[in-house]
Image (cartoon, rainbow, N blue to C red):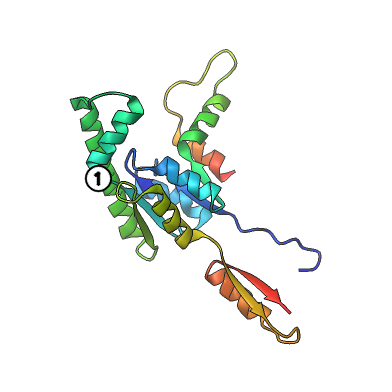
Amino acid sequence: MIGKSLSGKTEVSRMMSGNLDFTVLDHKAIAEQVRSRLGTEEEQFEGEVPLAEIEKDISR
Amino acid sequence: MEGKEAVPRRRFVFRGYPQKKLDDFQKFIAPFGNPEFILALTCKDDIVRQRYLKKHDVDDVNEEQQAELTEDSKLNKKIRTELTNHFKEVPVVNIDTGKDSMEVVARTLADKFAAKVILVNHESSLSVDTACSNLAIRYNCLYVSAY
């Protein structure tokens, strides 16, 4: 699903998963999960999460 | 099917296109296979502006923010052209979320992607299951055999 910012991707994703049984792979949400995995208790991971790490999580 | 459980077919939708480059996207998508569709959302710039004002609870969009929105719109056009040119065989579902209400959008999505059912009532001795199952897979339907 592609579309510029504020074109409704979030709302349409919700419809796709809620009504149509699609699994939505949202890079932004996955990036946040990866961020917590890359960081430690003492030091959080800062900056942009590497795309390769996000893709690894998705492929798993 | 004896001893085996039917595994439901999972369908995925990738929200957004963070790879930005077609080569990178192709490498990423290779294990999944080619996409079955491209869902292209759009809406007019003044709608984006209205949504921006509402989302950020501001009265106006400053020059810098406007430049970001314009840049994002240009990038999205480029991505769309690139993807549709590359995946020429893949159907593109265009949805204008500014023009259509969310009810219309939901209906459009359901028309395109909701499961449809092939119900066949037949004599048990007739061997129609394989043919009908293959049709159901081909047209993304559920096959129900009743005898």
Residue at far top of view: A42
Q: Residue B42 at x, y = what percent?
A: 31, 48
Res. B74 image quadrant: top left
Q: Residue B27 at x, y = what percent?
A: 45, 50
Report helix, strand or loop for mark 1. loop
* Left or right of B102, for residue B69: left
Residue at far right of view: B3
* Left or right of A13, for residue B23: left
Q: Residue A35 at x, y = what percent?
A: 52, 27
The residue sitting at 50% across, 21% down in the picture is A45
The residue sitting at 34% across, 51% down in the picture is B100
User: Mark 1 sits on what residue?
Assistant: B44
The residue sitting at 33% across, 38% down in the picture is A5
Count of numbered labels shown in the rendering: 1
Res. B132 image quadrant: bottom right
Q: Is residue B87 above or below residue A59?
A: below
Q: Chain of mark 1?
A: B
The foreground one among A16 and B4 is: A16
The residue sitting at 38% across, 42% down in the picture is A8
Q: Is residue B118 above or below residue B22?
A: below
Residue type marked 1? Lys
Q: Quadrant of the N terminus of chain B?
A: bottom right
Q: Is residue A29 above or below residue B102?
A: above
Q: Quadrant of the C terminus of chain B?
A: bottom right
* Left or right of B82, for residue B36: right
Q: Residue B125 at x, y = what percent?
A: 75, 87
Crowding at mark 1 (Cα within 10 Å: few <14, some 14-19, many 20+): few
The foreground one among B21 and B145 is: B145
* Left or right of A59, for residue B49: left
Residue at far left of view: B63
